[in-house]
Image: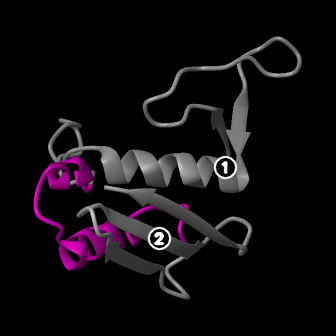
Amino acid sequence: MVDLALQYGGDLSVGPTGDLALADGPVLTQQRVLRRLLTNPGDYIWQVSYGAGLGQFVGQPGAPAAIAGVTRAQLLQEAGVAPSPPPVVTSTVGNDGTVTTALVYTDAATGQASTLSFSV
């Protein structure tokens, strides 16, 4: 499947032919994973259980176990993420209280391992 190339919080971009840039394969899955993790539950009125709402942890005391748990549960609901082998989510707290989360999951379409890392 192909969709518009649009990273969460970003803007549409122009592709090499002058049309809107498209994303497919692992890039599309990564876009969807980020959108799911950063969307608040209930924001999509037609699918109220969609979203991990990781933004709720910003400014809160570091809770790596909670962040990892919510992230793992939402990854397993994403169609582009293969359920087997299960995704690996690691969250650690830095000296400044920032929680860094690293994901390793298998892309369901390609069967390749993909990684993603971000700070909350």
For this rendering, which residue is in front, 50 or 100? 100
The disc at residue 106 is none
Whether residue 67 is in magenta: the answer is: yes
Q: Residue at x 69, y 39 (%)?
A: 23
Measuring 19% from the left and 37% from the top, which residue is drawn there? Answer: 43
Camera-side mark, 1 or 2 = 2
Specify few, some or many for label 2: CA neighbours under 10 Å numbering under 14, 14-19, or 20 or more: some
- Identify the magenta region: 52-81
Residue appearing at x 56%, y 31% in the figure:
6
Position above or below: 75 against 11 = below
Q: What is the spatial separation of the Cα atoms under label 1 and label 2, in whole angstroms?
A: 17 Å
Percent position (x, y) of residue 99? 30, 65
Is 1 or 68 nearer to us in this picture? 68
Q: How dense is the environment of label 1, judged by Cα within 10 Å: few (below 14), some, or many (20 and up)?
A: some
Q: Residue furthest front?
A: 95
Identify whether 12 is placed above or below 42: above
Look at the numbered disc 1 and give the secondary structure of its residue: helix
